[in-house]
Image (tube, grey):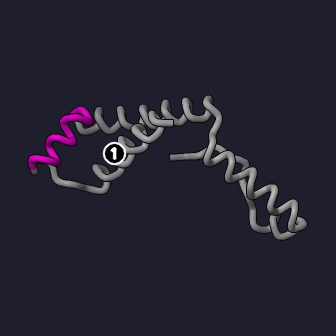
Amino acid sequence: MKIKTQGLKLSTLSSMSPQEREDKINSFIEQVINPQPEQVEEQKKEIEEEIRAYERRYEISSAKLKSGLADGSIKGTTDICSWLMLLKKRTLLENI
């Protein structure tokens, strides 16, 4: 999941005073822990698009994927793991 934040470069941090560095890092952490509602919605849309792309590529729904993995009719692959991670991310974002 991409978290849209201001980037932090170590070279920039090293040139700051200790207080500036602490403030910058705290601001970064706050953005990650408490994203703005519009950021969450944007991330949900991006994840949903990625999930739909997997469903189109494999021509099965996410529910059928999970069922197939549970009964052994579908074997795990790197793509399947990525798909499952997207499903988990979607669930986590729904609970924010």
Give x and y (percent) for residue 26.
74, 55
35 drawn magenta:
no
Which one is in front, 44 or 75? 44
Given the current orientation, which residue lies at the most extreme right position?
Answer: 17
Please give left or right for residue 63 compared with residue 82 in the image: left
**Magenta-tinted stretch:** 59-71
Q: Left or right of 49: which side holds 68? A: left
Picture quarter containing residue 86? top left
Residue 67 left/right relative to 79:
left
Q: Secondary structure at mark 1?
A: helix
Residue found 39% across the figure and 38% down from its top? 91
- 61 lies left or right of 95: left
Q: What residue appears at the point 47 percent right and 38 percent down from the top-left corner?
A: 93
The quarter of the displayed image where residue 90 is located: top left
Quadrant of the rendered image containing residue 47: top left
Query: The disc labelled 1 sits on which kind of residue?
Result: Trp
How would you rate the neighbour count of disc 1 (Cα within 10 Å): few for under 14, some for 14-19, many for 20 or more?
many
Of residues 6 and 92, which is closer to you in this image?
92
| Residue lying farthest to the bottom in this orientation | 14
In the rendered image, which residue does mark 1 sit on?
83
Q: Residue 77 location, x and y as percent? A: 25, 55
Instruction: Please say if 48 is above or below 11.
Output: above
* Residue 92 image position (x, y, % from top left): 44, 41
